[in-house]
Image (cartoon, grey):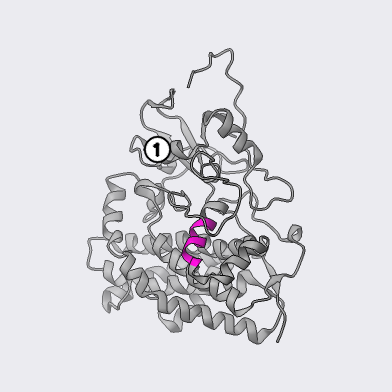
């Protein structure tokens, strides 16, 4: 690529965030235009910093795998308007997303062995049981529910309970804190109280696991060199990383399928496509739409030099719609083999719990569609409230109904 002279270089613009009207599943149009025009371009940040925006699949993937780019929060500039001003605080204890090697390596090595494909598959039976229990409750209630609190949130929340070893007697308390944290209607005071309660509960759970280990991830980690504070932090990190994303994939994925009747019919006719459908929905929806890194040294990318200290915004949603990587990328196709999508990230920070998320989605989505063959939106699609402007895209609520037999 020929580097334009400074006189020709366009003035940087802010990160596009407005999605096309009437298209709740498509990224902002300006992202596709940027990818076609110049896949690495200058970007103005709300605080005045000028960094880079990367929109092609190949370049996003390359940066995520390059140790010359850091994910430490305190080095980054925040790209979204209305966000925190000034220098960001370092990552909380246990938050692996905001760490670099060697600190990240220490945590990742301890956890990776506990998140094997084999272990996650052993949890399939529990996912099936939890899913069936919530579908039973929906059926008893009768047509007309909000799928988010009735199904999309509790399934992954209870699986996090299984993973961390939250005792059955405590699960209502634990999930109550989670509901308050995720509720769009909860007051700030209620959310702060839930955060404090959850932190205190997690600290107590760690002490209980040290005293009397059980068959769960936290108990496994008590034999490591992690401190109580680090164990509590990891528990909070796993909750945040594994709950909001999966809950939104279940709700937004259902919304996408109900809005694409041909794809819904294909999946219903062939439940064996569930795994493929999950990967395609991860690609197509890209709910974790944006990742941010900072260059630790000068790095040449696609003929341009990213200077040390420049913050780089990686548009996962644009990369996952890159026509050079995926044919007809703006179409939802549950028969597509979406291998190589970046919905779970890439490199050392690739989602640790991706196998658990896959199990949850590949079990829960087909079970929902099978149990309620006439499932449909209870409101016009344009009335579904979207999580616009949030780090994890999706829906605040999803009113659905079905024909009662």
373 in the magenta segment: no
Q: Where is residue 107 shown, x and y percent of the image?
A: 30, 55
Q: Quadrant of residue 30?
A: top right
338 lies above or below 73: below
Q: Is residue 173 at all visible to an observer of this figure?
A: yes
Dot 1 alpha-carbon crowd within 10 angstroms: few under 14, some 14 to 19, many 20 or more: few
Q: In the image, 340: left or right of 133? A: left
Depth check: 371 or 220 in front? 371
Q: Secondary structure at mark 1?
A: helix
Q: Which residue is mark 1?
A: 62
Vertical relation: 220 (above or below) 80? below
Horizontal side, residue 44 vs residue 230: left or right: right
Q: Tell me if residue 286 can be seen.
A: no
Q: Residue at x 62, y 45 (%)?
A: 27
Residue 283 position within the rendered picture, expressed as x and y whole percent measured from the top left: 52, 52
Our reading of the magenta stretch's main secondary structure is helix
> Which region of the structure is painted magenta?
273-281
């Amino acid at each position: 690529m020929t580097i334009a002279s400074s006189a020709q270089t366009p003035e940087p613009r802010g990160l596009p965030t407005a999605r096309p009207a009437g298209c709740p599943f498509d990224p902002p149009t300006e992202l596709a235009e940027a990818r076609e025009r110049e896949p690495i371009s200058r970007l103005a940040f709300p605080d005045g910093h000028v960094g880079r925006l990367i929109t092609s699949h190949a370049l996003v993937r390359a940066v995520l795998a390059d140790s010359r780019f850091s994910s430490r929060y305190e080095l980054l500039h925040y790209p979204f308007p209305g966000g925190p001003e000034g220098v960001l605080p370092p990552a909380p204890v246990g938050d692996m997303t905001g760490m670099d090697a060697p600190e990240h390596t220490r945590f990742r090595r301890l956890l990776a062995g506990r998140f094997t494909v084999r272990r996650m598959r052993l949890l399939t039976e529990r996912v099936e049981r939890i899913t069936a229990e919530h579908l039973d409750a929906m059926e008893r209630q009768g047509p007309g529910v909000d799928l988010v609190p009735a199904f999309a949130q509790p399934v992954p929340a209870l699986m996090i309970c299984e993973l961390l070893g939250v005792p059955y007697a405590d699960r209502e308390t634990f999930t109550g804190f989670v509901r308050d944290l995720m509720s769009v209607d909860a007051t700030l005071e209620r959310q702060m109280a839930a955060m404090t309660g959850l932190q205190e509960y997690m600290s107590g759970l760690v002490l209980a696991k040290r005293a009397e280990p059980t068959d769960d991830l936290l108990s496994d980690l008590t034999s490591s060199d992690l401190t109580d504070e680090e164990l509590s932090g990891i528990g909070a990190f796993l909750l945040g990383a594994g709950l909001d994303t999966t809950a939104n994939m279940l709700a937004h994925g259902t919304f996408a399928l109900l809005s694409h009747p041909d794809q819904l019919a294909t999946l219903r006719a062939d439940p064996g496509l569930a795994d493929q459908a999950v990967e395609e929905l991860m690609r197509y929806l890209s709910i974790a739409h944006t990742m941010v890194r900072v260059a630790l040294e000068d790095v040449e990318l696609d003929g341009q030099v990213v200077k040390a200290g420049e913050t780089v915004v990686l548009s996962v949603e644009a990369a996952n719609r890159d026509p050079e990587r995926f044919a007809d990328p703006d179409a939802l196709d549950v028969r597509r083999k979406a291998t190589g999508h970046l919905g779970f990230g890439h490199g050392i920070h690739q989602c640790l719990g991706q196998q658990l998320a896959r199990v949850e989605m590949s079990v829960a989505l087909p079970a929902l569609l099978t149990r309620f063959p006439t499932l449909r939106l209870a409101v016009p699609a344009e009335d579904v409230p979207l999580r616009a402007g949030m780090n994890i895209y999706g829906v605040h609520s999803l009113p659905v109904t079905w024909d009662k037999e």
